[in-house]
């Protein structure tokens, strides 16, 4: 049996491997550079179009078409770019290389359609106007919130292809040079292959166990040195790929963990591949304990199960609102779509959940507010209208009844005016807070509390109610004095209204850490526990009949709440029915 030397066995294999790697690397490099060059060209055209769009923002298309065309021609010449200004209707208003009136309507161009939808449109196709392939990049042409049209920049593909061909030639020559070097080095190292293989075997086994940090020693023999280099290179590439995959996994995990939406990824069989912390919290699940389980075993809510089943069976995206009732009523906006690979293969389903419970609660609150304000305004208006009709029907001839009716009308008018004043006050506080026009200053609280008490003393004395103030002289807070006084007047006035004759109201203030707490304590009938969560809503009344009889617009506590929020603080209430009620304003200390 003829024995063939190792060098002649390994040399062709080395050459084949090296050439294959070189071809793959050359192809990948050429493709990457081509893609990079095209992307950079598109980005450059986008920037040029955006500069023109900025230049034309203040122009009126209807009044300045000739000037716009002249600007396109001037800027196109300066930048060696074809620039086109197109109205939203598709009419060409200006072009750097053609007369606009001779050009077709451009509304059907794909890049124009894309730009009119607010995105950057990119298209490469044959230009019938110029007679060769062009790359087009279009950006929206806006003036404020109004979309006037599209600014498009383009370059001939001939120039781009020429640059790419030059790049290919350079890569090809470089690849040939590298290939020649590889051939020579492979032959040289193969001829020097005479050493033992034990070191390489032990090193290969070490790599197989995952120890990629320690490199193989390169022996003097050319054949083994080549093999050792190949193994070391392989280990380096594996280590880089492992680090890359690990980094990508951590990045994806960080992204999913930071999302406020719940994300569930399912495979084609309905098994749970992954769920982010927000999704696990929304569904009251332990993420680590449910991996690779069937989603039907994990999800208990029938509505969500039905939505997931429909998403698994339907490749088209699905969106729906779901109401989940477990330990409370929660509303989710659910979106389901197919999970696909980069090649378009279906891998499973992606479910995204967004908790819109608070949004729906705000909408319900708004509807309740509209209903309540309508009811509150209708009551005095109906009363006024009724007595006016009575007077017009003949009661004016009865002086005693007419005077009584007019007093009632005046009282209802005052009530209507009070409601409107409080609504305006509440609106002004909200607007000033949103515009950051409520300015806080560090000052002592005692004077503000005394002023508020003085405003309410007349009503309190009429009911034989005493108001006591307990506030340290040096207590300071970050406050807006007029607003804080208004909030305290509302709280003390409420306390006077609902306190029995001969009782005492305490106004207390003190410091608690970095905060200042102002309490108004009364010994009236108290508030039942079921009403406490809604006591600060607009027009909310614990006892509607008694509250209207006592007076007030029903907005006092809502004003207090918004004043507290404007101070960066909060207001709380604690009540023991039949014993006492304590309202607490928590503000920032100075």
Image: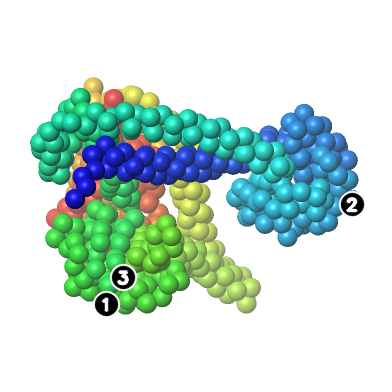
Q: Is residue 476 left or right of residue 36?
A: left
Q: Residue at x 23, y 39 (%)?
A: 6
Q: Is residue 408 left or right of residue 272?
A: right
Give the x, y percent position of residue 149: 73, 49
| 569 in relation to 462, above or below | above
Q: Is residue 380 visible?
A: no
Between 202 and 569, the one nearer to me in the picture: 202
Write down the residue under mark 3.
268
Write down the residue under mark 1.
302
| 179 in relation to 545, above or below | above
| 205 in relation to 515, above or below | below
Write down the residue under mark 2.
102
Between 141 and 213, the one nearer to me in the picture: 213
How crowded pointer 1 is (Cα within 10 Å; few <14, some 14-19, many 20+) is rated as few
Q: Residue at x 38, y 32 (%)?
A: 182
Snapshot quadrant of residue 531: bottom left
Q: CA distance from mark 3 to mark 1?
A: 20 Å
Give the x, y percent position of residue 292: 20, 64
Give the x, y percent position of residue 34: 55, 41
How crowded pointer 3 is (Cα within 10 Å; few <14, some 14-19, many 20+) is rated as some
Quadrant showing the C terminus: top left
């Amino acid at each position: 049996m003829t024995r063939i030397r190792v060098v002649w066995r390994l040399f062709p294999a080395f050459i084949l491997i090296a050439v294959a790697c070189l071809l793959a690397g050359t192809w990948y490099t050429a493709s990457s550079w081509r893609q990079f060059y095209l992307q950079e060209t598109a980005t450059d055209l986008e920037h040029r179009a955006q500069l023109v769009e900025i230049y034309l923002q203040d122009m009126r298309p209807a009044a300045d078409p000739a000037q716009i065309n002249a600007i396109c021609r001037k800027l196109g010449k300066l930048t060696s770019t074809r620039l086109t200004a197109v109205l939203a209707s598709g009419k060409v208003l200006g072009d750097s290389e053609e007369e606009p009136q001779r050009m077709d309507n451009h509304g059907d161009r794909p890049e124009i359609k894309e730009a009119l939808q607010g995105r950057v449109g990119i298209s490469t196709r044959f230009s019938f106007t110029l007679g060769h392939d062009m790359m087009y990049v279009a950006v929206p042409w806006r003036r404020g919130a109004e979309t006037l049209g599209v600014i498009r920049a383009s370059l001939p593909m001939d120039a781009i292809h020429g640059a790419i061909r030059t790049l290919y030639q350079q890569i090809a020559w470089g690849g040939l040079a590298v290939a020649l070097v590889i051939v020579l080095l492979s032959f040289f190292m193969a001829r020097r292959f005479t050493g033992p293989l034990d070191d390489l075997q032990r090193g290969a086994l070490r790599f197989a166990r995952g120890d990629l940090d320690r490199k193989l020693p390169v022996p003097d023999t050319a054949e083994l040195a080549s093999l050792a280099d190949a193994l070391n290179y392989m280990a380096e590439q594996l280590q880089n790929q492992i680090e890359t995959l690990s980094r990508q996994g951590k990045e994806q995990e960080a992204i999913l963990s930071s999302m406020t939406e719940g994300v569930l990824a399912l495979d084609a069989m309905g098994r749970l591949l992954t769920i982010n912390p927000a999704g696990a919290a929304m569904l009251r699940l332990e993420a680590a304990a449910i991996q690779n389980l069937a989603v039907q075993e994990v999800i208990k809510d029938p509505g969500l199960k039905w939505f997931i089943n429909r998403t698994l069976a339907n490749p088209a995206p699905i969106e729906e609102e779901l109401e989940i009732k477990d330990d409370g009523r929660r509303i989710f906006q659910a979106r389901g779509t197919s999970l696909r690979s980069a090649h378009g293969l279906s891998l499973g389903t992606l479910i995204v959940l967004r908790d819109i419970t608070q949004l729906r609660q705000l909408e319900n609150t708004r509807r309740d507010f509209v209903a309540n304000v309508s009811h509150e305004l209708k009551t005095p208006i109906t009363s006024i209208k009724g007595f006016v009709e009575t007077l017009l029907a003949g009661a004016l001839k009865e002086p005693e009844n007419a005077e009584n009716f007019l007093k009632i009308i005046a009282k209802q008018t005052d009530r209507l005016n009070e409601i409107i004043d409080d609504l305006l006050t509440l609106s002004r506080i909200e607007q000033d807070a949103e515009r950051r026009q409520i300015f806080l200053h560090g000052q002592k609280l005692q004077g503000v509390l005394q002023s508020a008490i003085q405003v309410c003393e007349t009503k309190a004395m009429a009911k034989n109610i005493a108001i006591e103030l307990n506030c340290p002289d040096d207590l300071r807070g970050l406050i807006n004095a007029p607003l804080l006084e208004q909030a305290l007047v509302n709280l003390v006035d409420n306390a006077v209204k609902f306190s029995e004759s001969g009782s005492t109201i305490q106004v207390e203030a003190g410091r608690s850490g970095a905060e200042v707490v102002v309490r108004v304590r009364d010994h009236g009938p108290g508030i039942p526990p079921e009403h406490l969560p809604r006591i600060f809503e607009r027009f909310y009344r614990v006892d509607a009949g008694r509250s209207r009889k006592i007076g007030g617009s029903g907005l006092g506590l809502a004003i207090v709440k918004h004043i507290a929020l404007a101070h960066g603080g909060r207001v709380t209430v604690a009540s023991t029915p039949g014993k006492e009620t304590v309202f607490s304003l928590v503000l920032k200390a100075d």
